[in-house]
Image: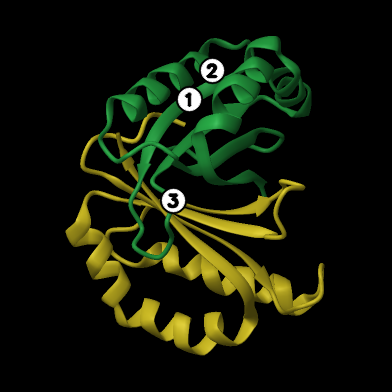
Chain colours: A yellow, B green
């Protein structure tokens, strides 16, 4: 991983699904989430496994934006809004968003 | 940021300091934390600002390890143990560790 450059934003979210671990519904959700990577402005998109024994989150998504305008455009993009409303709110049991910028 | 490769671990921690925002003590803590990057096995080390309005954390540290052995060696390294005992426990008000591996 290269350093996050000044002005760029790394948007991350860790989450736990309502679906049973290893279930088809879990796998299907992760496939659907992958489609967020196609929204304009999204860079370095990766869905990850969260593995710290010190928290209960099981997955994470990390992406980067060139700056605040790209981040806002993503948040307001119809595909993102639809994913949140139709999938995230129904299938995610707990989550935390963490955003980074260079110091 | 390139994808986190299979087998690698991205260790992150978000935190809030007990020090006032923008204080010399805050700056000094961040300088001291930077020294963790010199511990063997630590890669892609970066101290970041946490900027999401959806949580109260103000800083983050991100680093990567080639695998579990390197991560364990870091955790047990005397410089890391000393930093945790002498600085982290005294100066960090709240924190959350989040670790990632490839899906």
Could you tell me which residue is drawn at 21 percent across and 51 percent down? A67
Dot in front, 3 or 2: 3
The residue wearing badge 3 is B57
Q: Which numbered dot is residue A38?
A: none
Could you tell me which residue is drawn at 72 percent across and 73 percent down? A26
Question: Looking at the image, is mark 2 or mark 1 earlier in the sequence?
Answer: 2
Q: Percent position (x, y) of residue A1?
A: 47, 31
Q: Which numbered dot is residue B45?
A: 1
Could you tell me which residue is drawn at 30 percent across and 68 percent down? A74
Dot in front, 1 or 3: 3
Q: CA distance from mark 1 to mark 3?
A: 19 Å
Q: Give the chain letter at badge 3.
A: B
Q: Do pointers 1 and 3 mark residues of a single chain?
A: yes
The answer to whether any part of residue A21 appears in the image is yes
On the rendered structure, is A68 left or right of A31? left
| Location of residue B89 with respect to B100 vertically, above or below | above
Q: Are marks 1 and 3 in contact (CB under 8 Å)?
A: no
The answer to whether any part of residue B4 appears in the image is no
Q: Judging from the image, what secondary structure is the residue with disc 3 in?
A: loop
Q: CA distance from mark 2 to mark 1?
A: 8 Å
The residue wearing badge 2 is B36
Question: Looking at the image, is mark 1 or mark 3 earlier in the sequence?
Answer: 1
């Amino acid at each position: 991983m290269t350093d996050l450059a000044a002005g760029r934003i790394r948007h991350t979210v860790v989450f736990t699904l309502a679906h049973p671990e290893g279930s088809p519904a879990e796998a299907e959700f992760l496939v659907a989430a992958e489609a967020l990577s196609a929204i304009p402005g999204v860079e370095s998109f990766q869905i990850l496994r969260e593995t710290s024994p010190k928290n209960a989150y099981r997955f994470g998504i990390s992406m980067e934006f060139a700056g605040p305008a790209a981040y806002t455009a993503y948040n307001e993009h119809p595909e993102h809004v639809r994913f949140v409303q139709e999938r995230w709110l129904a299938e995610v049991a707990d989550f935390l968003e963490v955003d980074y910028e260079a110091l």
